[in-house]
Amino acid sequence: MGEVYLPILILLALGAAFAAFSVTAPLLIGPRKYNRALLDSYECGIDPTPQPVGGGRFPVKYYLTAMLFIVFDIEIVFLYPFAVAFDQLRLFGLIEMVLFIVTLLVVYGYVWRRGGLEWDY
Amino acid sequence: MSALLAADLAPFPVPSIEYSAISPLIAIFGAAVLGVLVEALLPRTARRPVQLVLTFGALAVAFGLVIWQRDTRATVLEGAVTIDGPTLFLQGTIIALAFVAALVMAERRVDVAGDDFAPRASALPGSDYERDLTRLGWLQTEVWPLLLFSIGGMVLFPASGDLLTMFIALEVLSLPLYLLTGMARRRRLLSQEASLKYFVLGAFSSALFLYGVALLYGFAGTVSLSGIAEALTDDAQQYGLVLGGTALVAIGLLFKIGASPFHQWTPDVYQGAPTSVTGFMAACTKVAAFGALLKVLFVALGGVRWDWAPMLWVIAVLTMVVGSIVAITQTDMKRMLAYSAVAQAGFVLVGVVAASPDGMAGTLVYLVAYGFASVGAFAVVTLVRDATGEATHLSQWAGLGKRSPLVAGVFALFLLAFAGIPLTSGFIGKFAVFTAGVASGAVALVVIAVVASAIAAFFYIRVILLMFFHDPAPDGPAVVVPSSMTTIAIAVTVAVTIVVGVIPQPLLALISDAGVFVR
């Protein structure tokens, strides 16, 4: 009974270890340069408080980044079920998945070649 | 551990994919993805010729594949897609219409600055940057992959075997259209406003459609069209779910069709979009959406025919009357054609309300007639221009018949087809849906339709009178001589309008051979 939960516990431990490592390692080995923008909440270009009168505007670049995030986020959503059943789907599943990822690579290639990944284009 | 997992999961069957049945879709979507790659990798000047070859090549190949598959009657892709006679007929019609509409989009000679699209859609309207790009002759070649994706969605739309596939097809056909709408070279602010309106309202209608799908799923426990039909044959327990789901799914589709009271976006979007895109939208979207509506109503919801027929009866009357009457008051050619498209949708709905094989055949005939006349009419609108672009105000068309009798004559032919005058394709379409309506007992509806046709004929004939019996203004617009692209498109649409009007038998035989939807 208990051993059913063992993999979950191991995964939890691995996750916690990874999180602890990711937080502490930069503190120990990373450079320390602080400025006002870096200390802002979210560090994303929007002043948290107070907002400018009338809402203000922020660059459309963030929108592009969010869109790209969704593309690759959805890709992962489709990869998970495949990862669970890849052995039963055999070669068929592999070919279909490669086709799917190649299609997304086309998107990636388009974004990259047309400067979508450069911040100051 | 792995044994435990294997016991929990039911054996997962490898889905079977019948590639031949979906080969038209593969051709179109494959070319669209290649088109994106072309945009990424080729130098700017090489893109347009390659995109044109890809677009027209893919459409020609897809049309050939539809003909090759003409005898296929099958449910494929684990029930996600059903291919049958009416579906193949609709697919062929959409691809043929798209080919002709794409010819108008490819036109470069009528506008001195380039084609129908902004040199770069992201450039601020009226900015120096935009002026420089126009001077350099830049073209936005992304329109071609966008067009192909949209056509792919339309070809999938009536072929959907379940409501989720239908929803995805709806989004795939809509999203590129929202973008294409906002890309006009002239009057860019109007175009961008139209794009935003279309997007926001389209998103609402998609949400309504999805809500309807959820309700039907709640009723039947499946989204498959045949599964819903089966669940309806059992003693219906939760009838409310069926009614709500039917209404919401129908609203989502009627929005795309442009039926009243869901037509509010039509005039603004048809006016703001680049005219070549308007022609494409008016023809292909309507054919695809009517195909999907027929499929949902006949395949999945045939068992509740007596519940949806009265609803569509009311909508058909509203659509015909509102479209015909409001069109009279319009002073802009594109807006008038938009309201005319609304009225036409109402006439097609008469065939759907008939809810019989004859009604469906009539609907298909009407869609072919309307589609080609529509692409042709908007192609003619692109030719009448003054210094600021297209001259779309009705007063500017006064006396066009004296200045340029051929173009005015062709436009008059399309208007007569819309009005349903004998010896044009429009008459065959109206005759087919009205006889089917009478045969199914909807006599009152057909009487209203005939009255609405008379009202509609008034504003069509008024434009013809304006063109031929008024004197042209001294500073009026000129008719531009187009390249072979638009010329071929107009010639084809004229030919179809006349040939179907004079010898309709081959088309009618093709439709009766197509038979009915399979489950």
Image (spheres, coloured by chain):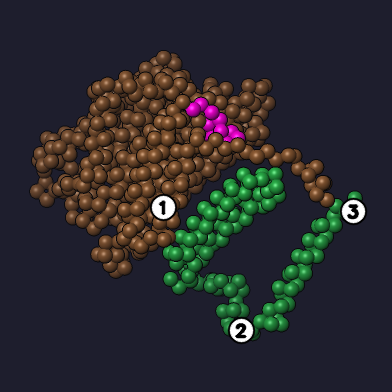
Chain colours: A green, B brown
Residue density around tag 2, few if under 14, some if 14–19, many if 20 or more, within 10 Å: few
Q: Do discs 3 and 2 share a chain?
A: yes
Residue under mark 2: which chain is it in?
A: A
Is label 2 in a helix, a strand or a loop?
A: loop
Residue visible at 20% across and 35% down in the picture: B410
| Pick the front one: A49 or B258 | B258
| Quadrant in the picture for residue B326 | top left
Mark carried by residue B159:
none
**From which residue to which does the magenta span run?**
B72-82
3D distance between C-alphas at marks 3 and 2? 48 Å
Q: Do discs 1 and 3 share a chain?
A: no
How many marks the image carries: the answer is 3
Mark carried by residue A34:
2
Which residue has dot 1 on it? B35
The percent position of residue B505, horizontal first and vertical second, equals 32, 19
Residue under mark 1: which chain is it in?
A: B
Kindly tell me whether residue B259 is visible in this rendering: no
Q: Is residue B189 above or below residue B463?
A: below
Kindly tell me whether residue B221 is visible in this rendering: yes
Compared across the picture, whether B190 is left or right of B467 comes to right
The answer to whether the residue labelled 3 contacts the one labelled 2, judged by CB atoms less than 8 Å apart, is no
Is label 3 in a helix, a strand or a loop?
A: helix
Mark carried by residue A2:
3
